[in-house]
Image (cartoon, rainbow, N blue to C red):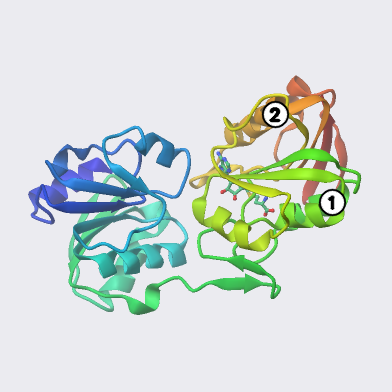
């Protein structure tokens, strides 16, 4: 929140100018507090990274190896990812400011940090906290790559980092192995659904994995070795050419922050309909309690459940 940053500047947490790296910064951040600073933004999520690319700053997906006068970290919800961001920031800058919402666990992070180093602040405002450290190092907080079932590479913060998502597993076994032609996986995550689909369906000629979270897509690139796979770091709700796909498979996201945001899932359904050719087919899984039927009927011939279990429902929808 800019209001905490403004208060932090007034409290001397940082001064305008110099070289500044903003890690995970929201795309609407007011940059006037930084004066004529040379600003680098690290943002590995779309569409935020796309918005930053339209502003007058350097935008990168991963933190460069350079040194900076100041690093500011916006804390993500996954604790291991937050630890990693802070460890990385402290490795490239002496002064590191950390900002986050209570709902994203900023208070427990502050406790974690105080156990190890001296922390200045905090500034508490607008349901969040901001604090800063100088010359701190957190070598144990760097993300450790992990593997699921001895096969799937994941990193902290990606969807379903602790195991294969049961909804994706159910979907991967539900559709016939006759899927063919050009297929898109919208919200492909670390690649489970795409990898299994390519193994099962020899008639697929190309599978486009579309994912907004750069770290997840990087994992997918290591998990899906099939040459028919293409990887796209993009917002699936606006990506791709209309009417060019034979099939779309997806386990759409339905959380935005902490709230259930069915709007995003509905936008995925609309995007699938846009991408599919005439007679193209959508295979989709959703949690049983989520209402997709009406949105499916708006864009497809039916919105009926094909199969499912007590937790998930699978839809087969044709244009
Ligand atoms: C429920 S997960 C499904 C992951 C994956 N298909 C699997 O097999 O486990 C939904 C995924 O959609 C991604 N996502 C969220 N919003 C997105 C957007 N606008 N465009 C593309 N991907 C998005 C999330 O990062 C997440 O990886």
Q: Is residue 287 visible?
A: no
Image coords of residue 156 (percent x, y): 51, 64
On screen, residue 223 versus residue 80, left or right, reads right
- Crowding at dot 2, Cα within 10 Å, few <14 / some 14-19 / many 20+, comes out as many
Image coords of residue 272 (percent x, y): 70, 31
Identity of the residue drawn at 36% across and 50% down: 24
Identity of the residue drawn at 48% across and 41% down: 46
**Alpha carbon separation for disc pair 2 and 1:** 28 Å
Q: Is residue 190 visible?
A: yes
Identity of the residue drawn at 74% across and 25% down: 294
On screen, residue 117 versus residue 262, left or right, reads left
Please tell me whether residue 220 is drawn above or below residue 83 in the rendered image.
above
Nearest the eye: 122 or 302: 302
Q: Earlier in the sequence, mark 2 or mark 1?
A: 2
The residue that label 1 is drawn on is: 309
State which quadrant residue 104 falls in. bottom left
Q: Secondary structure at mark 2?
A: helix
State which quadrant residue 3 falls in. top left
Nearest the eye: 96 or 116: 96
Q: Which mark is residue 275?
A: 2
Please tell me whether residue 225 is drawn above or below residue 235 in the rendered image.
below
Q: Nearer the viewer, mark 2 or mark 1?
A: 2
Please tell me whether residue 130 is drawn above or below residue 254 in the rendered image.
below
Query: Does the beta carbon at disc 2 come under 8 Å from ligand 1?
Result: no
- Crowding at dot 1, Cα within 10 Å, few <14 / some 14-19 / many 20+, comes out as few
Query: Does the beta carbon at disc 1 come under 8 Å from ligand 1?
Result: no
Image coords of residue 5 (percent x, y): 20, 47
Image coords of residue 59 (percent x, y): 34, 45
Q: Secondary structure at mark 1?
A: loop
Identity of the residue drawn at 61% across and 42% down: 254
On screen, residue 16 versus residue 215, left or right, reads left
Q: Which mark is residue 130?
A: none
């Amino acid at each position: 929140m800019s209001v905490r940053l403004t208060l932090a500047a007034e409290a001397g947490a940082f001064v305008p100018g110099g070289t500044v790296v903003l890690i995970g910064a929201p795309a609407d951040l007011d940059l006037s507090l930084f004066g004529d600073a040379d600003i680098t933004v690290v943002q590995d999520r779309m569409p935020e990274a796309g918005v930053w690319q339209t502003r007058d700053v350097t935008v990168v997906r991963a933190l460069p190896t350079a040194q900076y006068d100041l690093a500011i970290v916006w804390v993500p919800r996954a604790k291991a990812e937050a630890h990693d961001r802070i460890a990385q920031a402290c490795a490239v800058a002496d002064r590191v400011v950390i900002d986050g919402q209570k709902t994203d666990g900023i208070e427990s992070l502050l406790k974690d940090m105080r156990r190890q180093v001296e922390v200045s602040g905090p500034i508490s405002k607008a349901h969040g906290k901001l604090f800063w450290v100088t010359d701190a190092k957190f070598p144990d907080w760097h993300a450790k790559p992990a593997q699921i079932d001895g096969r799937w590479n994941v990193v902290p913060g990606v969807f379903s980092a602790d195991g294969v998502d049961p909804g994706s597993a159910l979907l991967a076994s539900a559709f016939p192995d006759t899927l063919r032609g050009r297929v898109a996986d919208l919200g492909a995550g670390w690649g489970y659904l795409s990898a299994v689909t390519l193994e099962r369906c020899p008639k697929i000629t190309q599978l486009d994995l579309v994912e907004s979270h750069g770290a997840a897509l990087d994992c997918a690139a290591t998990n899906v070795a099939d040459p028919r796979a293409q990887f796209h770091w993009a917002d699936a709700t606006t990506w791709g050419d209309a009417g060019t796909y034979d099939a779309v498979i997806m386990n759409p996201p339905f959380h935005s922050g902490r709230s259930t945001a069915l709007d995003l899932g509905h936008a995925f359904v609309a995007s699938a309909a846009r991408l599919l050719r005439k007679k193209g087919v959508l295979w989709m899984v959703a949690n049983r309690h989520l209402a997709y039927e009406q949105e499916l009927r708006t864009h497809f011939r039916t919105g009926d459940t094909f199969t499912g279990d007590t937790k998930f429902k699978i839809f087969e929808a044709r244009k």
